[in-house]
Image (spheres, rainbow, N blue to C red):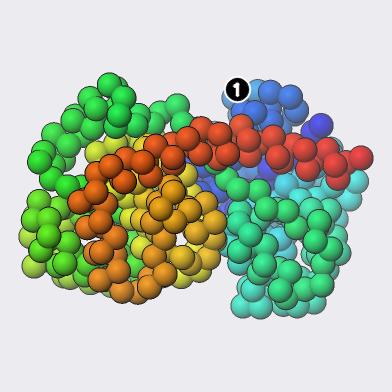
Amino acid sequence: MRIAFICTEKLPSPAVKGGAIQLMIDGIAPFLAAKHDLTIFSITDPSLPTYERRHGIEYVRVPNERYEHDVANELSKRTFDVVHVFNRPANVLQYKQVAHASRFVTSLHNDMFSPLKMKRDVAERVLAEVDLITTVSAYMKRTITNRYDVPDDLVQVVYSGVDITPYTPPWTEEGKQVRADMRQRFRLEGDDVILFIGRLSRAKGVHVLIESMNDVLADHPRAKLVIVGGKWFSDNRPNGYVHFLHKLAHSYKDRILFTNYIPSEHIPRILAMGDLFVCSSQWHEPLARVHYEAMAAGVPIITTNRGGNGEIIEQDVNGIVIDDYSSPKAFANAINELLCNKEKALALAREGRKRAETTFSFANTAEQLERLYVTICQ
């Protein structure tokens, strides 16, 4: 098959500036390119050429000023069996005009069928035109099926995944060495390290996590919260919320560390230094991909029962899921439990790693997509 991936207009592919969609594409593309002709469209970036072929994959990059128009122009010059539009379902209507012989797939990584983002008449046209919709969680599937009368098999849940290769669980010899090296680098020797990794936005709940540290430190005075991220992926410029977080953390002195954004290729080593990872999302998270990364790293996970997060984290099996997501006390209780109960923390971490190796591998994600592509092309 000839397959086209069309990224959003936000970030380039490969994921030189991060991004959950771009990282997913980086992970599944090699498996699909091994058997099919794959072309990936994305925005330009100073570090990347406008056109290249690498590892058997064709990359076409256009400026983001007229992204949809320029991608449509490039589509008109080629023929594809499947065109997969990532997280921009409304753009299917424009692309299909120049690639009417192709089968169209759109994937949802956010609630793009929200009335705030797409008028009902446009949404209904998109639903009539696409051959398949994939979603990153069952929660995201419901954002469509609860609003529109669509055949159940039109919308398929395809969870993202992770490449476990760069991750070193702490129970391995390599993992122990990486952990020691990273803790020395960040001056965390002897600390109980709590990790947050993600964008610094109110929706991500970093303020709630900081507020939980009062109760955590009462039980574990050597606890340290390490906050990894900037206001927007590679953008470390401060805004009002970031200033608020630093002010909130001021009284904790060296017990809270802000690292700013760290590129995705370094995240496996960052995770290696943690005793646990916390996703403090306050909004209906579609399903944060950092959960897959923490599982691969063999780090126990605490997350919130918001959106799709609880679909891959099973209570007391491969993590802890917090229902009272806005309560600093609830986070403190979960953190203290895992810092006190090392056996439980290790059991959760090992099960997470096991699931990352099997159920949530990029190979498995690519296989599911390929099977769906074949089905709609028959």
Left or right of residue 313: residue 243: left
Does residue 121 sit above or below 36 in this rendering?
Answer: below
Quadrant location, the C terminus: top right
Q: Residue shown at 11%/38% (left/top)?
A: 189
Left or right of residue 241: residue 123: right
Q: Residue shown at 81%/32% (left/top)?
A: 1
| Residue 62 in the image, given as x and y percentages of width and height | 61, 46
Quadrant of residue 205 within the rendered picture: bottom left
| Residue 210 in the image, given as x and y percentages of width and height | 22, 65
Does residue 206 sit above or below 33 in this rendering?
Answer: below
Left or right of residue 38: residue 53: left
Q: Residue shown at 29%/65% (left/top)?
A: 331
Quadrant of residue 74 within the rendered picture: top right
| Residue 17 in the image, given as x and y percentages of width and height | 44, 44
Could you tell me how many numbered marks the image carries?
1
Q: Secondary structure at mark 1?
A: loop
Query: Which amino acid, by three-letter code, is at mark 1?
Result: His
